[in-house]
Image (cartoon, rainbow, N blue to C red):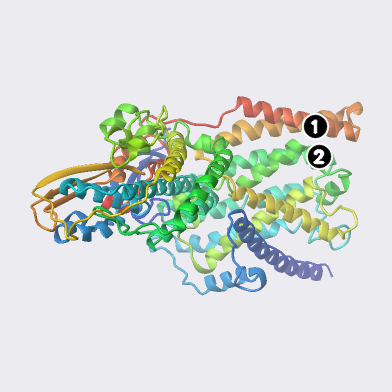
Amino acid sequence: MDWLHWIAFAVFIVVFVLGMSMFGIWLERRGVARLQMRPGPNRAGPLGLLQPVADAVKILLKEDIVPERGDRLLHTLAPIVAFVPALMVFAVVPFWRGEGAGLVPDMNIGLVYLVAISSISIVGAFTAGWASNNKYSLMGAMRSMAQMVSYEVPLVLSLVGVALAAGSLSLVRIVEAQSVPFILLQPLGFLVYFLAALAELNRTPFDLLEAESEIVAGYHTEYSGMKFVMFYLGEYTHTLAAAAIGATLFLGGWKGPLLPPFLWFLIKVFALFVVIFWIRGTLPRLRVDQLMAFAWKFLLPLALVNIFLVAVEMSTQSLRTLWVMVAVNIVAGVLAVYLFSRLGRVRGGRVAV
Amino acid sequence: MALRTEPIVLNMGPQHPSTHGVFRMRVTFDGEVIVGLDPVFGYLHRGFDKLAESRTYTQFIPLTDRLDYLASMSNNFGYCLAVERLAGIEVPERAEYIRVIMAEMMRISSHLMAIGFFLNDCGAFFTPLLYMYREREKLLDLFDMVSGQRLTYNYMRIGGVSHDLPPEFLPALRKFVQEMPAFIDEYDQLLAENEILLARSKGVGILPREMAINASASGPVLRASGVKWDLRKKDPYSVYPRFDFDIPTAETGDCYDRYRVKVQEMRQSLRILEQALAQIPEGPVRAEGPHLVRPPRGEVYSRIEAPKGELGFYIVSDGSVAPYRLHVRGPSFINLTALREMCLGWKLADAIAILGSIDIVMGEVDR
């Protein structure tokens, strides 16, 4: 019966996640429109809810163009490599407690799996840029390698704090360990995770890969039709995945009073999602060198401070009381952020030519 | 072992999201760093200077709308002023005031767009631009009230303006002048100390004072480099000497300074509008005289302070109904002179921000 469960759940996840992504697209377009004092899409369906469907139908009817001197095989493979890992992340995310909560929700190395899978999509972005035989794409690809590899480091380090505090790598155990959400216990860890995730997702202010005003559409400049949809949907699925991981690890997953656990989980995911597009509607973009400086000079030290704090607290009996930890960590987090924002500068200068 | 690398050449434009129309930059990159940059113009060339020779003086006014199409009224103003100087036509006082009001409204509108697009070029996702549109929309409604058009107004005539203001215009403008400072404060609050904007624009694309003068830059670009030069004060025309206003300048001449100077200039324009509203007299809006202007033989160079800098018209008359030769000095075009020096050594993203901060309109660059 095992394989039946897997097939059923795999189909369920694909359909459900794609539905959520489409809802996410609608939510972002409407939300950003509201931030910008315009109505947003409001013609297709009630409140424009069918807009993503209409978009998808339109795009699917478009001709699929491969650049003449591009690499045909890689050009086709790239969107698949970029899209599939985003779906695979959801395999281990526990939607609720107990049986059938996910495909393999109680995988004992869940956290490691997450990190490993989500970094595969870099390959997709880079392949796309390389195979397109376009200079804008190539620049996007170069940026993607530098950016994603750099931000992987603080991202993983911020997750180490969670694993330390929960004493497990299984996502179910981590949720169960959160008698208060870890965001209170490790505000610094959450901050680092959230910012690094924004960069991993190419979201503003770190959206250098597809910086429209600079390199047109970055690595997917030369994509159209079905392949473009893969990138587009993949981007939103990735965003949702990052929000889901954030909700699971830092916001207490399915836990919450009154409402059913599944609903709580969705609320938390979309709350994070809203914050992500809120930032997109607000901030300008960093420059390449500033982006790298931000990862190595700012996020990485903060992540190390966080690990240090949690480790000390977990190994000292007197500090292990919950509310002491919350208080100490919030104070230390604020202090660390303040100090680094005073000391560190991300501004870079002119290069002599 | 050092890796063998070579620079790549990238043609940015003429179809690129942030080259403000059909501008093209042939950029040589070493990685992301710019080591060479050649601006390429001409994709929007329509031959205005030549077209003028086969039109009467009045018939050329609609074409001036298409120079800097984000500041059509200023172009009308500059051209009419040049012809009036050549033909020795006196403009009635009310018309002078109407012209100044239009020019200052145009300056606010143009600077709003410049700031909005600059932030877009810095990577903001359209939000600042759409906020600027909100204010510009009110100005466009006012222009619509006056001329029936929203972009190319063709409102001014040689010897005045085409017709008087509608009665509802002045109250509406008064309301705008009262409300606008609060909106500028709002933008200041959101943008002036935004850490990312500072990181992206402070110290970036510095145009030193000497280079700015040598490149004969003008307008906000020149003033941001620390030169206190404004034709409304230095070579007064129309009724500008009657108004009390300051020339905002900045020190370093980087992108941030160019942005700040534009914000300050909007405040000064509001001051001028306020005074003009208090002083505007009743009376005719157009000088008496024949409709077909025949200036005497001679030549004139007349310049005004357009939103983007010194807008000059050089006209040679042979005594007939059409100019013998006409030349436009477009500030956008001249301000681009120093683009290469400003961009070298910066990164791709900076070049876009620098271009945005110079604030060009292709209609004026190519003519």
**For the C terminus of chain A, which image quadrant?**
top left
Visible in this render: residue A22? yes
Residue at the (74%, 33%) spot, across then down: A306
Indicate the position of residue A15 as horizontal and vertical percent values. 71, 69
Q: Is mark 1 on a helix, strand or loop?
A: helix
| Label 1 environment density (alpha carbons within 10 Å; few <14, some 14–19, many ≥20) | many
User: On the picture, is A265 further left or further right than B316?
Assistant: right
Amino acid type, residue under disc 1 in the picture: Asn
Q: What element carries label 2?
A: helix
Q: Check disc 1 and report the residue beneath it.
A: A329
Label 1 lies in what chain? A
User: On the picture, is B132 further left or further right than A32?
Assistant: left
User: On the picture, is A156 further left or further right than A101?
Assistant: left
Alpha carbons under labels 2 and 1: distance apart: 8 Å
In the depicted view, which residue is nearer to us: A326 or B49?
A: B49
Q: Residue A184 carries which label?
A: 2
Residues under numbered marks 2 and 1 in contact, where contact means CB atoms less than 8 Å apart: yes
Q: In which quarter of the image is residue B194?
A: top right
Indicate the position of residue A95 as horizontal and vertical percent values. 81, 58
Indicate the position of residue A64 as horizontal and vertical percent values. 47, 69
Amino acid type, residue under disc 2 in the picture: Leu
Q: Residue B230 carries which label?
A: none
Residue at the (51%, 64%) spot, across then down: A76
- Same chain? Circles 2 and 1: yes
